Amino acid sequence: MKKLSFIWISLLTIFVFAACSDNNDDTDYNQDSGVVIATPEVTTTTGTSLTVTSSVSGNVSEVVKKGFCYSVNVQSPTITDNVVEADDNFEATLSGLMGNTTYYIRAYVYGNSRYTYSETLTASTESQSMDEQLKNYVAPAYEDNYVNIADWSKRDQWNLSNVHDPTVVLAEDGYYYMYQTDASYGNAHTAGGHFHGRRSKNLVDWEYLGGTMQNLPDWVIPKLNEIRAEMGLAPTTANTADFGYWAPCVRKVRNGFYRMYYSIVCPGTISGDGTWSERAFIGLMENDNPANNDGWVDKGYVITNASDKGLNFHVAANNWANCYYKWNAIDPSYIIDNNGRHYLAYGSWHSGIALVELDGETGKVKTDLPNPWGTNEDIAAYGQLIATRQMGNRWQGSEGPELIYHDGYYYLFLAYDALEIPYNTRVARATNITGPYLGMDGTDVTTVGGDILPVVTHPYKFNGSDGWVGISHCCVFDDGNDNWYFASQGRFPANVGGNAYSNAIMMGQVRCIRWTKNGWPLVMPERYGAVPQVEITENELVGNWEHIDLSYSYGNQKTSIQMTLSSDHKVTAGSWKGATWTYDSNNHCLILDNGVELYLQRETDWEASPRTHTIVYAGYGKDYKAYWGKKSK
């Protein structure tokens, strides 16, 4: 397993929060409060507001406060969601809303030290033109530095807080469902099971759902002991609390059928000091409706670590480049190819990324799996190499494969380097699912090995912020209309604001993907905030930009410099000073005469105060170097 990952998980235990009850009297629906609240009614509707009214009867003498709570996602909102207080007539206006959007609304009253809620009203704002939507745009308000709400008792407020290694699927009910590795600031998640889920209708506001798996699956320890017995080893003595739950991958197989592959990392070593780490497993859960977060049914074992060193598990216990295992059974990525065949890509560090074919009906490996040790020929059923940074090196710093198909190519996204700070994302593609996978620079990571370009994400910092690091181990998904997205965690750098554990702040981040004319994915530099995509005019491009050269620099945040575009189509400041520019409005592309093409999009300016919208770009140069930028306000 990746050594740094074990270190990271153990560090989280240093600052575990005090235990809190799952119950929170301030937010529970209380039917015995002695008051009755009418379901809200809408009196006035605009494109950005809803005026609502309600009434209360019964033991009204106890009421000291009343108002309305509302949400896009949460069907029974509480005061942990959006709140506006009501006037004496129990009326209020919910403002700053999005046009043509459905909201869930409940009235509440507070009295006798508790909240009471009405039934839910569903109401929609009026449609607006794109220009009106942009003029009235309200940026997401949630805090990135979420330490004050990181505790389990505040989970209803998390939104995208405490997200690590996300996987996202668009379900048939119109919700995007996100699941993740078991990791959180202060290990707050441990109160609620494993492979936690949340959902969203708009990719901005996320409703926390809780764990999809409550306990270690029943098959894990028996399977581990079965393998250990075949290896001539005694049964494991590991504590069930020490098993790790990593890197799920969720996919919709068809309407009414979803699969989630997941990793279980076994603690300890194979046979004590001087031997290699215990193995990991990939398992499978299935569900007919992800809205039922408790409906995931475990289907058991799929695959485990395989070794080409026979039973010589003492070999190279401290020699990372020559470790015992060839394949590491974590980080699954499930795909159904264009011919309807099912595959699983998996692997972390060790020899690289493997691909194995699955049986579409069972979701398990298609061929019979022999014992997970022997010669290369003996373990061939465990998969074939599709990507490595260095052929033959068992510690070559790539993991988190994400395999998708788009417009004639299979794209393999890879996480490079250590996860705490240096994490960065690369991408290669192939016309055949088994490869060879080539980077934009022509590097063949399947048959030759090497470091591919382009860099897709990298630690960075715009002005007015601490920036983000650890941006990788992605999932890539679309909305069914060829709009593509990249989701990952982002982490604060170390020691932000004097917080020694700031690098453990993990915010889920969703970004738009644009595709170049040559079919390469570009990840936008600013996170998705549902900014209306009003046409970008040439006049808007004139002025100052924050420009970032995203070329690879291990463990360093790339910072911005000023680039200025003049109205006479010159670059008058920055590293490209003297170049000329033109604007391809049909493709929203800023083209420089040095061969760089920068793809433009409206996105949220997260660093602005207050947050607003701006224009951003991402692009590649002729040297395969990546660039990010945003228009300065």
Image (spheres, grey):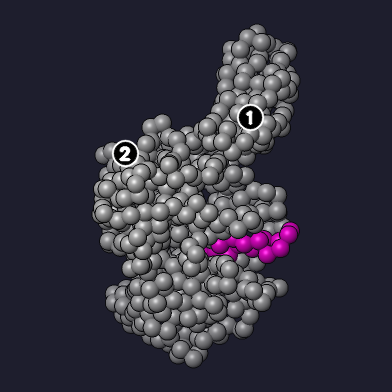
> Which is the main secondary structure of the residues drawn in magenta?
strand
Name, please, the residue furthest toward the front.
568
Q: Nearer the viewer, mark 1 or mark 2?
A: 1
- Which residue is nearer to you in this view: 521 or 583? 583
Mark 2 = which residue?
464
- Which residue is nearer to you in this view: 62 or 606? 606
**Is residue 124 visible from the viewing direction of this image?**
yes
Mark 1 = which residue?
47
**Residue 385 coordinates in the image, percent (x, y):** 46, 80
Which part of the image, by quadrant, shows the N terminus? bottom left
Type of amino acid at the residue the image marks with label 2? Gly
**Residue 250 coordinates in the image, percent (x, y):** 59, 60
For the record, the magenta segment spans 249-265
Query: Could you tell whether 34 is left or right of 144 in the image?
Result: right
Type of amino acid at the residue the image marks with label 1? Gly
- Kindly identify which numbered label has been placed on residue 483: none
